[in-house]
Image (spheres, rainbow, N blue to C red):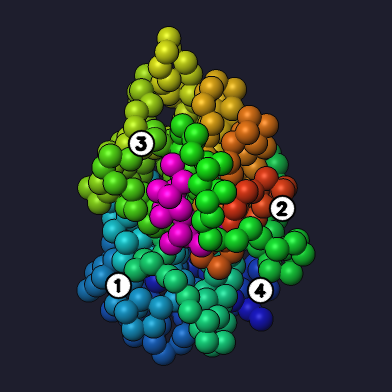
Amino acid sequence: MSVRVLVVDDSRFFRKRIEEILKVDSGIEIVGFAVNGKEAVEMAAELKPDVITMDVEMPVMDGITAVRMIMKRRPVPILMFSSLTTDGAQSTLDALDAGALDFIPKRFEDISSNSDEAKLLLRRRVKEIARRGRAINMRIRHGAVVARPASTAAAESPSSMVPRNKPIPRVPIRSHDLPKQTPPTATFSRAHASEAADIKLLAIGTSTGGPVALQNVLTALPANFSLPILMVQHMPGTFTPAFAQRLNQVCAITVKEAQEGDLLQPGVALLAPGGMQMRVARRGSQYIVKVEDGDPQLNYKPSVDVTFASIAANFSGRTLGVILTGMGADGREGCRALKQKKAEIWAQDEKSSVVYGMPFAVFEAGLTNRVLPLTEIGPAILQGV
């Protein structure tokens, strides 16, 4: 079954460019074009596309307003085209809050210096979010209760997602690919609580769907939360300051973008800067973060693997590592390193993940102590530390 796409942009040139890129894939069908948000709302109701690609700045009605109206009337996965600027970051975060599922840079050279890789990533992203939408609709049709936040957002850093001179790996998200074993129960037992009682650090890694997922977890934590928190979200450098600020406004704990030399402190969540790598180092009896230029050979900037491996190498206390929704397998090797140091590893479950790539990779490797729905992760953390 082809993925039916509605393209929304006021630029005739850009609409044509998107059409040329998407129509190469026989599994994608362009069902219509809209030149402003008002047309997008009307055509979404009429054509019932599987995915909508949406610009932000348009005449008559902007993309954010259109997203909000579409999600209210008939929810559909929406992929935003964003400029990688400070203003673009704010607008994109607003669109994600309104219900857009993911975003991608409008300038394809910001995705990858390799034009073919950038085009492949766009086609792949459209098909991935279409699967998510169909999975949700399937569960609704079968009467399942779907716990879905007000907005299901995603903010991978597309410019750092594509490996340089390497093929893009296939993401294993199909349910029939799952191991035949039964995932750990989501119920927090006394045994789990006693095992996790000596946790000294909370480390979280995520990608596609991460902004909403992180907010869900962090808003469950009180201001007097006893652990320092390190977070890695695949996101461009122009986006992470605005995202950290937004989280700080809605959370009881303190959230900030990590800076060189920041101390690990209880109740303070440090977000890895986009385009950089965040590592843990020891300074006397204290622990600090080191913020370094991202290695151009690494697929992700920031990388969950890099941060988690540095925790395993340099942090003496026991760590709770949590892998949330995301495309790819970043975090698997970092969790493997943490596991060797007696860390507790949790992963988000498939049903609540926007893309079940990163959590699946950790689960498939046999590294998870627990698999939990998104809404239960925050409360479980509180019960266990």
- Label 2: which residue? 364
**Of discs 3 and 1, which sits in the foreground?**
3
Distance in Å between CA atoms under marks 4 and 2: 28 Å
- Label 1: which residue? 68
Q: Is residue 37 above or below residue 358?
A: below
- Label 3: which residue? 226
**Residue at the farthest right position:** 180
Q: Secondary structure beneath disc 3?
A: loop
Indicate the position of residue 183 as horizontal and vertical percent values.
66, 60
Residue type marked 2: Glu
Distance in Å between CA atoms under marks 4 and 1: 28 Å
At horizontal 72% and vertical 48% (from top left) the residue drawn is 366
**Of discs 3 and 4, which sits in the foreground?**
3
For the residue carrying disc 3, how many other residues have a C-alpha within 10 Å: few (<14), some (14-19), or many (20+)? some
**Of discs 3 and 2, which sits in the foreground?**
3
Q: Secondary structure beneath disc 4?
A: loop
Earlier along the polypeptide chain: callout 3 or callout 4?
Answer: 4
Residue 255 visible from this viewpoint? no
Residue 68 visible from this viewpoint? yes
Earlier along the polypeptide chain: callout 3 or callout 1?
Answer: 1
Q: Is residue 97 above or below residue 89?
A: below
Which quadrant is home to the C terminus?
top left
- Label 4: which residue? 27
Distance in Å between CA atoms under marks 3 and 4: 49 Å
For the residue carrying disc 1, how many other residues have a C-alpha within 10 Å: few (<14), some (14-19), or many (20+)? many
